[in-house]
Image (cartoon, rainbow, N blue to C red):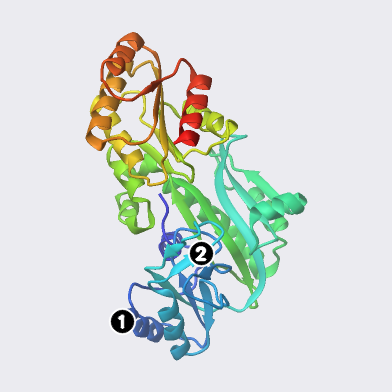
Amino acid sequence: MNIHEYQAKAVLKSFGAPVAEGVPVLSLDDVQKAVDTLPGPLWVVKSQIHAGGRGKGKFIEDAAGEKGGVRLAFSKEEVLEHAKAMLGHHLVTAQTSAEGKQVNRLYIEDGADIDRELYLSLLVDRATGRPAFVASTEGGMDIEEVAHETPEKILTLPIDPTTGVTDADAAQLCDALKLDGAAREDGMKLFPILYKAFTEKDMAMLEINPLIVMENGHLRVLDAKVSFDGNALFRHPDIVELRDTTEEDEKEIEASEWDLAYIALDGTIGCMVNGAGLAMATMDIIKLYGEEPANFCDVGGGANAEKVAAAFKIIMKDPNVKGILVNIFGGIMKCDVIAEGVIAAVKETNLAVPLVVRLEGTNVEMGKEIIKNSGLNVIPADDLDDAAQKIVAAVKEA
């Protein structure tokens, strides 16, 4: 689950991290109060959407395309002017679709005198199975670009969970970020704070880009992007309350209510599978044969017919879907249950696009018989390769 920048900063501040004073704004009526709360003379007006690259983004409604989603204001009047240009408008960044995301919230924050911009993040390092810091002196840039062009400027430091961040770990991070004086003292305190927040709140990622050294020599968290492990949210009702469903795909919200793993993609072939590995293989082979998957949809190993039908209907809500591939390997889940769910959903949705079904595993013959006797226009497949070729061909012919 993702949260907004202002929410992430509030979480970090509660652990003792240094952040600027700021006020969230949900309507133009809130702008004046926010400005009066902050001292100025520099205010920063930030669009709050679940996407990176806001500063470099462009508003669709801004014909000139001159200003992004993060703007400086040197007067209270200019703050209001920026707020009017952002709230309710669609911001397009490198991490959004061409339609962008509507800005429904702003964050008005105290300005800062910046000396240097740094990059710092925390995530789980799959190579070591431990939480790890990623640090670079190249703050403000996409870390992927830094990794590609100057990988020597990035330090990845796994942390032993039995000890947490030691003084030696903190010192190594300070060295990598070239911190000295007051900034180094701040860093020695900050890195354990961030690690504590990351682990105690079950974060999946904590990214600070940039972490700044101010002209007075101290550190400040200038931006914060945080996501949480969805499987651990039951332990954090306070975090669940921060969820902004307006930032999420309606299909993904409905899928979560059915405990389905669904992610919307940009292709034309809807996929329904059981198991993440099988889902990835299914999407890969669709691409191999010249089409793109429209979604990742994993119904899990223990789904019943009702859950399968729900997944099918969610897939059909995507107007870009031109065909559907059902690829099920029945182990815990039985093929006849899958078949019953598919048939029920096809009848209820009046399916008008090609459907290819590949079943294998427990009760596979029963499942195939149910589909065969359904009287519906369903294309059977013998294996994954056969299924992929048939759905791609059917979509291209449609």
The spot of residue 187 in percent (x, y) is 61, 61
What residue is drawn where x is 36% and y is 39%? 315
Q: Amino acid at mark 2?
A: Val
Disc 1/disc 2 C-alpha distance (Å): 25 Å
Q: Which mark is residue 29?
A: 1
Q: Amino acid at mark 1?
A: Asp
The spot of residue 284 in percent (x, y) is 55, 32
The reply to whether discs 1 and 2 touch (Cβ–Cβ < 8 Å) is no
136 horizontally vs 49: left or right: right
Name the secondary structure under disc 1. helix
The spot of residue 376 in percent (x, y) is 29, 24
Is 85 drawn above or below residue 278 in the view shown?
below
Q: Which circle's residue, 1 or 2, is located before the other in the chain? A: 1
137 horizontally vs 124: left or right: right
What residue is drawn where x is 43% and y is 72%? 107
Q: Which mark is residue 92?
A: 2
What residue is drawn where x is 55% and y is 76%? 67
Name the secondary structure under disc 2. strand
Q: Is residue 94 visible?
A: yes
